[in-house]
Image: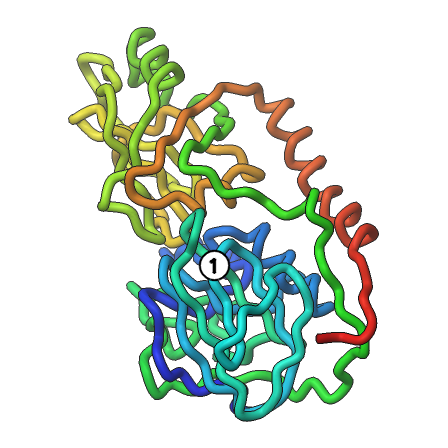
Amino acid sequence: MKLFRVVKPGFFTTVQDLGRHGFLRYGVPISGAMDDFSLMLANMLVENDPSDACLEITMLGPELEVLHGTQIAVAGDISLQINGQDSELWQTTTIRKGDMVSFGKVRSGCRAYLAARDGIDAPVVLGSRSTYVRGEIGGTHGRQLKAGDYIEGFDAVHLVDHCLYLPREFIPSFSAEIDVDVVLGPQLGSFTEKGVKTFLSSSYTVTVEADRMGYRLEGTGIERSERVDTISDAILPGSVQVPANGKPIVTMRDAQTTGGYPKIAAVVSPDLHVLGQAKPNDKVCFHKITLSEAHRRLLDYKKMFSVIESKLHRRFPVT
C-alpha cells in the first residue's frame, strides 16, 4: 500500500529499523537506527512493535504527500507541519489522504524518526528493512529517499480513537556536549599510560567526516606504544579506534565488520543512541566504567522502556 509520495527528500532520509543481526561473519554491517531509543519511542507512540521500520531523518527533513490515511508519531527535535500548520512531536497524530507532512531543520541533535501505524513496508533483506547505502540493500532498494519515491506502508484499518503522548520527563534532550561511558580495551596494550589518560581527560570534536559508518574526532592526539602490531579483527558499533595520527574514530551503525587500527575502548550500548545524535562540531567526552557497571547500565536501559510504556498518557479524541 502506497502511504506517502516523496515531494522533497530532505538531506538524507532512509528507512531504518533495529538492524540486521547475525551476519557480521559474512561482512554485512548491522546498520539500523543511529538513535534506536528515539526510533523505539516513535514506534511506541503508534503502538507498533519496537523493531518496526521508520523513516530516519538527518539534519533536514522531507516533504511527504499522504496517499492513505494513517497515524504517525515523530520523535526528535525538528520542525513539523501538517498542511502548513505546526504539529506536535512525541505523540500520536492522525493524517488523512491529501495531507502534506513537511519537516524543516533539526533544531537540536542530528536526527528524527517518523513512525507510521503498523510500520513502514520495505524489502526485508537478511531479516531487516534497514537501508545500508554502501551495500545497496534494504529500504528503497538500498539508497536514501529521492523526490518521486513512494513509501509503502501497511493498511492500518483499525486506527485508534485516542492520542498517546510522551510525558515531558521522558522526552530526551539533545546536547552539543556529549558524555558517553566506555569500557577500556580490547587493545589497551597498544597505548601508553599517558595516551589512555589523554583519551579519558580530553574533549573531542566531531569533524565533518562523520556519517552512519563512523565519526572522525579532532582533539589531543592519543599516544600509542612504540610498536603496534594489530591484526585486523572484529569491529562493532561503538568501537573507538586510534590510527597512527592519534585522533580517535568512533564506529557507528554502518561500521565495517573488521579493522586493523587498535581499539582503545568500546562505547557502552546504552550510550550509542546518544552518539547517534552527534553532528559536526559537537563535543564528545569519554568516561571509563567497568564491564560490570556496563552490564548494569544495559539492564537499566532495557527496563526503562517498560517504565515509559506504563507512563504514556492518553488523550481523547486523537488529533
Report the front residue among 133 and 94.
94
Q: Is residue 4 above or below residue 55?
A: below
Report the coloring of the rendering.
Answer: rainbow
Percent position of residue 57, x then y: 43, 63
- Local packing at callout 1 (Cα closer than 10 Å; few below 14, some 14-19, many 20+) is many
Whether residue 119 is visible to the viewer of this picture, yes or no, is: yes
Q: Quadrant of residue 38?
A: bottom right
Tally of numbered discs:
1
Which is more toward the observer, 243 or 65? Answer: 65
Name the residue furthest top: 193
Horizontal and vertical percent position of residue 303: 75, 42
Instruction: Report the amino acid beneath label 1.
Output: Ile
Where residue 135 sits, quadrant-wise, is bottom left
- Residue furthest to the front: 85
Pointer 1 residue: 78
Residue 23 in view in this figure? no
200, above or below 126, in the image: above
In the displayed structure, would residue 309 be above or below residue 297? Answer: below
Name the residue: 58% across, 39% down: 270
Residue sitting at 29 percent across and 43 percent down?
A: 280
Q: Position of residue 1 (x, y in %)?
A: 56, 92
- The residue positioned 17% from the left and 26% from the top of the image is 244
Foreground of the two, 247 or 205: 205
> Which residue does the image show at 73% across and 50% down from the upper left?
167
Query: At numbered mark 1, what does the secondary structure look like: helix, strand or loop?
Result: strand
Residue 170 rendering spot, x and y as whole percentages:
68, 45
- Reply above or below: 262 against 37: above
**Screen quadrant of the C terminus:** bottom right
